[in-house]
Amino acid sequence: MKLPFDVFPRRIETARLLLRRPEEAEEALYARHAQDAYATRPEPLSPGQAEAFAAFMLGHWDRFGFGFLVIEIAGSFEKHVPIGHAGFKYVDAWPNHWPGNYDAIELGYSIVPSARGRGYVTEAAQAVLATAFAVFDVPSICAKCSPDNPESAAVLLRCGMTEREATDRMRRFAIGRPA
């Protein structure tokens, strides 16, 4: 796969959402959102882990030209409310580690608890998946979630992904390029 600089859009709009590239000046906001999104999980993020993720979110865009987009609820008069993120990373990339393999991308998302249950994550994930298949030359896209997060698994299934593996530590999903 060739590196996708200037291929993935910096902005995607859906019926209710605006997804946009993160801005460096908002790094603290992204860290706070990541920490809020994981606060209800069995292993919440520490402030340091949330800060590392926010830096990673920005760094992936700088290095590779794509990454996670900020999810905002579109409001009237251009006032948007940021509620989380959705997008992609190289499978081998994570905070404090850059990939050695550029053949596979992975869908990821999170949303603050106050915005859950309204279909925002599914809407955002479907939009970024459609965009990724339109611009990347990949045969499939993968995703994963913790077995104790059935809501996230339900989002992946609603997006058309198929569960490929389930262990006591991780559930893995994939979707192939639409025909």
Image (spheres, rainbow, N blue to C red):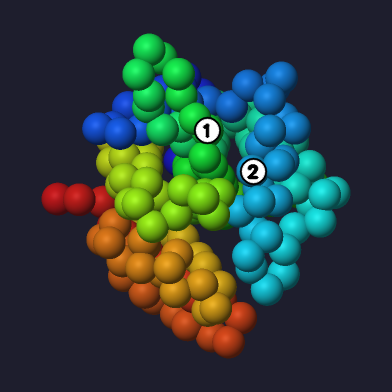
Residue 55: horizontal and vertical position, in percent? 74, 36
Tag 1: amino acid: Pro
Task: Tell me if mark 1 has few (under 14), some (14-19) or many (20+) residues whose alpha carbon lies within 10 angstroms of its own.
Answer: many
Residue 139 % position (x, y): 33, 52
State how far apart marks 1 and 2 are (Cα).
9 Å
Residue on which disc 2 sits:
33
- Asked if the residue under mark 2 is in contact with the one under mark 1, i.e. CB atoms within 8 Å, the reply is yes
In the displayed structure, would residue 107 be above or below residue 133? below
Picture quarter containing residue 155? Answer: bottom left
- The kind of residue tagged 2 is His
- The image position of residue 80, as x and y in percent, is 46, 24
Residue at 47% over, 82% down:
166
The image quadrant of residue 167 is bottom right
Taking the spot 53% from the left edge, 79% from the top edge, the residue there is 147
- Work out whether 36 lies above or below 168: above
Q: How many numbered marks, from 0 up?
A: 2
Q: Is residue 24 above or below residue 119?
A: above
Q: Which residue has dot 1 on it? A: 82
